[in-house]
Amino acid sequence: MVSPKDRLSPSLFNIYINDLPSTHSRKFIYADDICLGTHDHTFTAIEDTLNEDLGEIAAFLRKWRLQPSDPKTLSCVFHLHNASASQDISVQLNGQHIRHEHNPVYLGVTLDRTLSYNAHLKKSAPKVGTRNNILRLLAGSSWVASATTLRTSALALCYSTAEYCPSLGQIFSY
């Protein structure tokens, strides 16, 4: 059972960070995850924009005594030109170089440079397969689950996992 405190925490956190400073980058915020996204013609311009914006965010975090998660703080580049696909960028937060990741995970979705979601789908396929096996067991059991139970189980177990990622494509294709 979820306690009232656990239900209230995300709302209180959203109120707490409601006055995040304006940035040149677009902010994607979900609960306590904040992603900055920007685009430009050169990597230098992208680095300059992100470093400036991260300076603003860092000042805000210090003011409100918030600490970013080092393992979750990273940079990445999405580029359709193969020669530039593996380009690292130099971005800093509080004077510390941010680790560059070619296939970052954001909100549980593994992203790749072309936003094709191939890495995420390869990771999700075994999960869906295992859950399909559970459905087969339910359907073939001696007590034979009703059609409603099987449908509800399929939606909860398989469909939710298989359909988790596609809507994020719209978020990242701004």
Image (cartoon, helix red, strand yellow):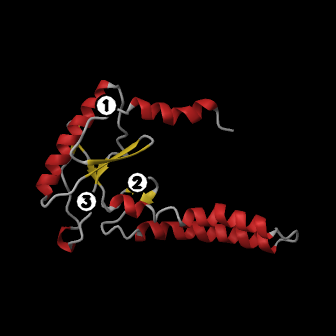
9 relative to 49, above or below: above
Would you say 75 lies left or right of 130 here?
Answer: left
Element marked by disc 2:
strand
What residue is shown at x 63% (from left), y 68% (from top)? Answer: 130
Inspect the image, locate mark 3, and give the three-letter code of the amino acid beneath it.
Answer: Val
Which residue type carries mark 1?
Leu
How many neighbours does mark 3 have within 10 angstroms: few (below 14), some (14-19), or many (20 or more)?
many
Q: Which mark is residue 106?
A: 2
Read off the residue under disc 1.
61
Q: Work out which residue is located at the far right of the displayed protein and give it.
A: 143
- Tag 3 or tag 1, which sits nearer the N-term? 1
Q: Which element type, helix, strand or loop, lies under badge 3? A: loop
Up-down relation of residue 4 to residue 92 (above or below)? above
The residue shown at (77%, 66%) is: 148
Q: CA distance from mark 1 to mark 3?
A: 24 Å
The residue tagged 3 is 77
Query: Of marks 2 and 1, which one's residue comes earlier in the chain?
Result: 1
The front one of 96 and 3 is 3
Between disc 3 and disc 2, whose residue precedes? 3
Q: Position of residue 57 (x, y in %)?
A: 27, 36
Circle 1 sits in a helix, a strand or a loop, which is it?
helix
